[in-house]
Image (cartoon, helix red, strand yellow):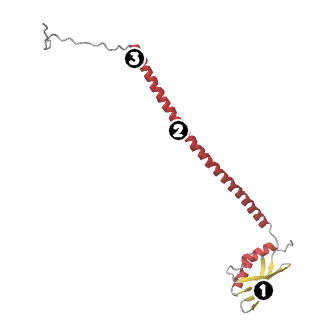
Amino acid sequence: MIKVNLLRDQTVRVRKTFKGPTISPTGLIFFSIFLITCASMGTWCYYVKQQVKTGTEKRTRLRMEEARLQSLQKEIDKFEKLKRMRQSRIDVIEKLKENQTGPVLLLNTIIQSIPQDGTMWLTNLTQKDDQIKLVGFTQNTDVIPDFMSNLAATGYFKAVDLEQIESQKDASKFSLTCTSQKKPQVE
């Protein structure tokens, strides 16, 4: 007959021990060196990518800035050319103004002396030696004394005399005789 004991055996318990894998210290050192190397290579690779990205962005910005500066330089050159051209024109005008003689100075003096209100206009100017005769019309005879004093104040004339005034329907005709301080020059 066979007897089976269904109750657990009350004997001493013995723990079973499993033998785990053994790690050698040399392998652990090589593995840690490998991990450190991989981490440093990853960090270096990330750093290099960031530097390349930053450099590319900076290059793009600098190219755009260079294009903008070149367009500004073209505009500056264009304006400098215009400035030189205008300055040369101004120089020519000033040189011509300095070289004005005779009739040009006489006409400039008379034009500057005419009142600006537009009530006077000249119709005739004749010059014989140092005598100058001005003939014109005015709607208001009160501007004739102002015109005469303006002519005398220029310093171009020794004397300014009123020769005649004729009253007409719309305007009065007048004539002035002026004596020039300078001898007329023939051009």
Secondary element at image label 2 = helix
Of labels 1 and 2, earlier in sequence is 2
The residue tagged 2 is 54
Secondary element at image label 1 = strand
Q: Tell me which residue sits at (67%, 52%) in the image.
A: 74
Quadrant of the image for the C terminus?
A: bottom right
Other residues around mark 3 within 10 Å, as few (<14) / some (14–19) / many (≥20): few
Give the residue type that dot 3 points to: Leu
Other residues around mark 1 within 10 Å, as few (<14) / some (14–19) / many (≥20): many
Where residue 165 sits: x, y (%)?
75, 90
Q: Nearer the viewer, residue 158 or 185?
A: 185
Q: Nearer the viewer, residue 35 or 78?
A: 35
Where residue 76 sits: x, y (%)?
66, 53
Other residues around mark 2 within 10 Å, as few (<14) / some (14–19) / many (≥20): few
The residue tagged 3 is 28
The residue tagged 1 is 175
Q: Residue furthest front?
A: 1
Secondary element at image label 3 = helix
Of labels 3 and 1, earlier in sequence is 3
Number of disc labels: 3
Residue 90's disc number: none
Instruction: Tell me which corner region of the image, top left, top right, bottom left or bottom right, holds residue 94.
Output: bottom right
